Amino acid sequence: MRGAQVVNDGLWRCLCPSFDQRLLQTSVRSFTTRRYARNSTQHTARRPWTQQRHVAKQLYSTAASVETNSGEHADQPPTTQQPAETLEPSGSENQQEPLPVERVEDPSAIKVLLKVKRLQDIPSQAVNRHERTMKLITHLIQRRKYPPSLFIYECVMDAMVEAQVSTFAVRKLLKEMERNDIPPSEYLLNSVLLFLTIHPDYALRSQVLDTLERQWHAISDDARAYVLVAMLREGQFELAYDGFVSDLESGKTFEPWVYDIFVVVFGHEGFLDEMLDLAAKRRAITAQDDAGTFNLLYFTLDVCSSASHYSGTVWSWLAGMKDDKTVPSDGMLENVLATAARHGDATLAAEVHSMISRRTRIHIHHYDALVEAFAGSQNVEGVLRVMEIMHDNGLPISRKTALPLTELLCAQPKLIPEVEDVMREIAQKRDSGRIAGDIVDLVLEAKAKSTGAESAIALYEEALALTGRKPSVATIQDMIVYSKEEECRSRFLDDYKSRATELSGSKIWRKSHAVKLLQAFLKHGDLDLTFSHLNNWLEHKTTSEPDLPAHSLRLLTHAASEAHDRRIVVTYDHYRRLGNQDALEIIKATVDRVKPQKPETFQDGEPSL
């Protein structure tokens, strides 16, 4: 066996074991006799590559050398491998013709280098193209004394398209080509543009585009895509988007990966409307069942639902997320459900709720979102049926859960008769003939708050038949607060007296009702209810809560002084603990006014009745 072929066989077995058999078979065949076609650009007058910027010349002094007669990059481990297919020049005019046999002593080495340069079917994760290319070039130049050529520089530039190489090295390579009087080809300049998508450099990109224009080369769609992606890397999002849309409108075509990069970048940056526009265009140019399309839909659904972007969430969901072929994560479903609830989309909320129920147990916050969605769409029947399901599953129906319904009924009182009819219908269809008492209590509160407690008396009396129990004590407090007529308020106060002991501690009433209830008790002349609730409230009161109005406290102190009720002393102690000097002065002044003839009214700072 010839010595040159032995060297080639050993080199190839070391560099590409996976293609050993196939390439060894081709290496023993005669090399093509087709003459090397000189680059057509050599017949046109053009200016060589020049560095016109002073900053770029300063960078040459610190750049890492990428001279073609050295193999300094051959032993560097790669950090990120670029997919091989992205390095292939587009168009048949960019295909490099094989070198003539008489130009080299070992044509098989050039053949191996050409195969590595054009390699398409090996995953980039398994091939270190940079290392292989540099080793082969080192072998050609140092061992075989092959002179530097445009083909060699193109191979080096292809190998430099990765993360571990800097723009300094590319500038050094271009300067060496200028020194050797080798003008860069269109293929090499496109490789530089591809490199700049990894390491963006505005000055270098402008020089490459100027050189392409001087050489009368049209900017290909791939080159334009490289420029747009580089602009994204530089943070020029608006310019990149405008340029991309303009190119699409002018008839340019781009590969799906360009759309993918724009969609992902815009999604992370929060440009959701622009992201959805490009995602729709990306979906239109590929098959509906394309794996990349589904991955993109997953991303858009995640981003839009996390940001509560309703239109984007609905589009992503309807585009392919709601069928059984796709499996959105639990977090995505939670975000989609929350988005549907916020925007009142009951249909979307029901679909997501159904998918969640097939995976895991439904919790209270899932029902809360469903209630909010139905209330947002003004579907009161759906709200009541969801609440009934919660009651059947043993989940409490809190004020927080019913808040969307309460707000809806207060904003649109005309829906209250419909709610009452739906409650009666649900109760009739159930075996027990009853509906959850919490639902009736919440409807009573909403009706009393919106139209007054007088209009809710009929439903108040019907509550026992609908639920099997009387309205709760908290509901009676609502009726007292929202009563407009004294006769109606007195009726509810009579019901409240017999059941007031059911509440105690800090939950004796809602904080928003405290002052109004005390005023109602005081106006009704019931000191027992007034002092029991007032002292209990003051015992748990914080300084941030509103105080009893001065005139109400003055009336209470006056009534207690005339009745010789010493519970006012306990009230005085609570105000002293809270540090409310205004309330203390009111109590002292009122007691002194009622009993001015007794100078010993206050002893040791306390009222004495």
Image (tube, helix red, strand yellow):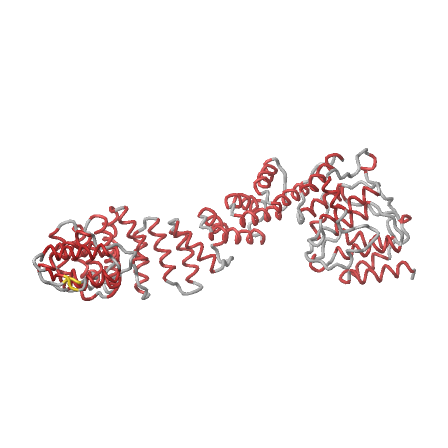
Residue 444, can we see it?
no
Front residue of this view, candidates 147 and 585: 585
Q: Looking at the image, is 523 positioned above or below residue 219? A: below
Q: Percent position (x, y) of residue 590?
A: 14, 55
Question: What is the quadrant of residue 235 in the picture?
Answer: top right
Question: Is residue 288 rendered to the left or right of residue 609?
Answer: right
On screen, residue 196 versus residue 319, left or right, reads: right
Residue 495 in view (yes/no): yes
Residue 350 image point, x, y percent: 39, 55
**Direction from residue 371 to residue 143 in the image, left or right:** right
Identify which residue, 244 or 284, lies in the foreground: 244
Check the picture and name the quadrant holding the N terminus.
bottom right
Number of numbered labels in the structure image? 0
The residue that appears at 35% across and 49% down in the rendered structure is 376
Q: Is residue 222 above or below residue 121?
A: above
Which corner quadrant of the image does residue 428 belong to? bottom left
Estimate the x, y position of residue 415 in percent, counting from the top left. 26, 48
Residue furthest to the left in view is 597
The C terminus sits in image quarter:
bottom left
Which residue is the extreme one toward the top? 45
Residue visible at 84% across and 52% down in the picture: 69
> In front: 461, or 167?
167
Q: Closest to the observer: 235 or 295? A: 235
Quarter of the image holding residue 213?
top right
Q: Position of residue 342 (x, y in %)?
A: 39, 51
